[in-house]
Amino acid sequence: MNKEKLVIDGVRVDGSRLRPGDWIERISSIVAEFGPDHRLHYSASVHPCVVDGQKCLLVEPELEEKNRELYEYILHFARHNDLVIHLNEEAPDSTNKEKNLSECAVGL
C-alpha cells in the first residue's frame, strides 16, 4: 500500500482554476457523514485542506485499500482535469509543506 498522502491542488498545471470552485467539497462529500450535531463531517481519508494558502483535496493513503474505486475515481478526475498532484510521504525530516499538511483539520 502507498504510504504517501495524495494532495490535489485546486489549480491546473497551466495555473488556471478548475470550475466549479467547490469541486473539492463535492468530492469530499462523497464519503462525508452527517453527525449528531446535524453538520457534515468529512472523512479522515478524503477532505478539503489548505496548504500554503492553496485550497487542496487531501487523500490519505488508506483510502486506496479501503475504497479502491473512490481512490481511482479521484486520481482519474485529477488527471483528466490536469490538476496539480503532489505525493507527500510522512517523514521525521518533514518539509514546511508537510508541516502544513499535518495541520489540516478533518471537521472543516
Image: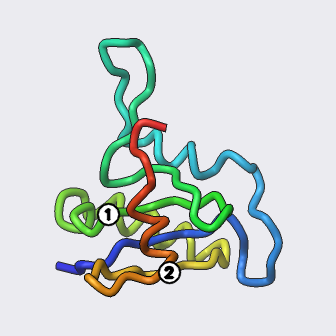
Q: Tell me whether the residue at label 2 lies in contact with that at label 1, contact meaning CB atoms closer than 8 angstroms.
A: no
* Residue sitting nearer the eye, 96 or 55: 96
* Residue sitting nearer the eye, 4 or 27: 4
Q: Which mark is residue 86?
A: 2
Left or right: 68 as drawn, with respect to 11: left
Residue in the picture at 48% in, 70% down:
7
Task: Tell me the kind of residue under disc 1.
Answer: Glu
Most distant residue in the bottom direction = 93
Residue in the picture at 32% in, 63% down:
60
Residue in the picture at 56% in, 43% down:
26
Left or right: 64 as drawn, with respect to 43: left
> Percent x, y for residue 73?
43, 64
> Percent x, y for residue 10?
67, 64
Instruction: Tell me the distance, in whole angstroms, between the alpha carbons under discs 2 and 1.
Output: 12 Å
Residue 14 lies, with reference to residue 49, above or below; the image says below
What residue does disc 1 label? 60
Residue 70 lies, with reference to residue 9, above or below; the image says above
Q: Secondary structure beneath disc 1?
A: loop
How dense is the environment of label 2, judged by Cα within 10 Å: few (below 14), some, or many (20 and up)?
A: few
Left or right: 101 as drawn, with respect to 35: right
